[in-house]
Image (cartoon, rainbow, N blue to C red):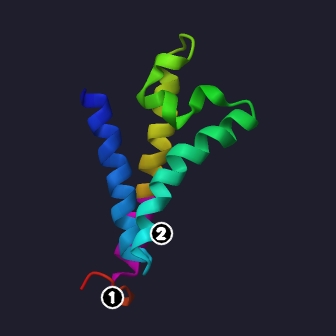
């Protein structure tokens, strides 16, 4: 679906920006997966399970909830990616991981 593709692009951009910033490729590409998996457990622990990253993409295991709750984790990913983009744009001359 389109919603799944948009979220996949958000996770991919997060991984790409982390790949530029960090020297360790494994760590940079693992962080979005850890956000996806561990973020859900942490949000459940603080009683914010309706904003779980897993239930945003595949909402089949939760009770019905308002549609805006699916946008909160997505907007968090977009915000983090935007912050990383601004940081990279500002410090591009110091980052040599591209080559």
Residue labelled with disc 1? 96
Q: Quadrant of the C terminus?
A: bottom left
What range is drawn magenta here? 82-92
Kindly identify the residue that appears in the image at 46 percent across and 41 percent down.
75
Q: Is residue 95 left or right of residue 54?
A: left
- Residue at (60% x, 25% y) in the render: 50
Q: Nearer the viewer, mark 2 or mark 1?
A: 2
Measured as percent of width and height from the top left, residue 85 is found at 37, 65
C-alpha distance separating marks 2 and 1: 17 Å
For residue 14, which quarter of the picture? Answer: bottom left
Examine the structure image and report whether residue 35 is included in the region drawn in magenta.
no
Neighbor class of circle 1 (other Cα within 10 Å; few <14, some 14-19, many 20+) is few
Measured from the top left, where is residue 86 in percent x and y? 40, 67
For disc 2, the marked residue is: 27
Figure check: 25 above or below 34: below
Tell me: residue 76, above or below residue 89. above
What residue sits 44% from the left and 77% below the top?
24
Q: Is residue 42 left or right of residue 96?
A: right
Q: Earlier in the sequence, mark 2 or mark 1?
A: 2
């Amino acid at each position: 679906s389109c919603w799944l593709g948009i979220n996949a692009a958000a996770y991919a951009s997060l991984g790409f920006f982390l790949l530029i910033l960090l020297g360790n490729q494994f760590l940079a590409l693992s962080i979005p997966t850890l956000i996806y998996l561990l973020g859900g457990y942490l949000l459940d622990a603080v009683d914010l399970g309706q904003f779980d990253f897993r239930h945003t993409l595949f909402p089949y295991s939760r009770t019905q909830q308002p549609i805006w709750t699916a946008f909160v984790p997505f907007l968090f990913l977009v915000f983090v990616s935007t912050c990383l983009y601004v940081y990279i744009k500002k410090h591009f001359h110091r980052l040599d991981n591209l080559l």
